[in-house]
Image (cartoon, rainbow, N blue to C red):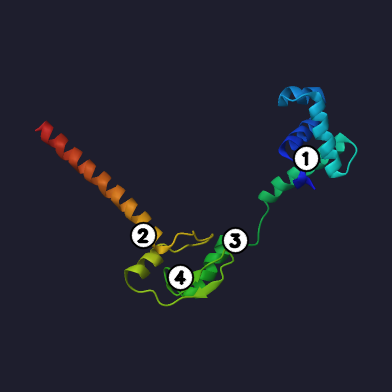
Amino acid sequence: MLWKLDETQKLCLRLVHQGYTSKQIAQQTHLSAGTVDQYIFRANAILGVTDRREAARLLATAEHQAQLKQFQLRSEDLAGQTKIALIAGQGDPFPAMSSHIVNEPTASAVPQGSARGLAGAIKRALAVIGGEPHELNFRQKLLAMSWVALATGGTLSALVAIGYWLNHLMS
């Protein structure tokens, strides 16, 4: 039921949980005390409680549990995904893309035809090791790599030209 509360109702309940009165909440939120009471009354109705402190306690408990779930250990680990990909590739240095592609974070391997030539080398170089693969297609990947190469080459050329120019000025 907490998902039905809007952000202002949650804010008012958080402040109630901290011990503020409606007048104090009104000063902090730039609302009137009556409006604050209405937000709290509606939140009580949504949560099915009659006491504002009980509603505030429910919200605080739920938010605390949600914060704890962020740091909870999960069974899906990146090391396990990489291990599955390595077993599937049987020693290939780029196992995720050479003979199998890892499509999902659960590391389900989907057979793919043998990759040869420049396209195969680029696919192996851009292999995803753990985590979810990005959604770029081959053309977008090639364009992104070209931009990086162009920027790197331009920077290197500028540095060489500045060095040459400084060397010419000093002699």
Does label 4 or label 2 sit earlier along the sequence?
4
The residue wearing badge 1 is: 60
Question: How far apart are the alpha carbons under marks 3 and 2?
Answer: 30 Å
Q: Please name the residue that numbered disc 4 is placed on.
A: 95
Instruction: From the image, tell me which residue sits under label 2.
Output: 142
Residue sticking out furthest to the left: 171
Front-most of 73 and 52? 52
Vertical placement of residue 101 versus 47, above or below: below
Q: Earlier in the sequence, mark 1 or mark 2?
A: 1
The image shows residue 40, relative to residue 135, as above or below, that is: above
Look at label 1 and name its amino acid: Ala
Residue at x 80%, y 24% (from the top left corner): 33
Q: Quadrant of residue 158?
A: top left
Q: Position of residue 117 (x, y in %)?
A: 32, 72
Residue 151 is left or right of residue 114, and the answer is left
**Residue type of the residue flagged with mark 4:** Pro
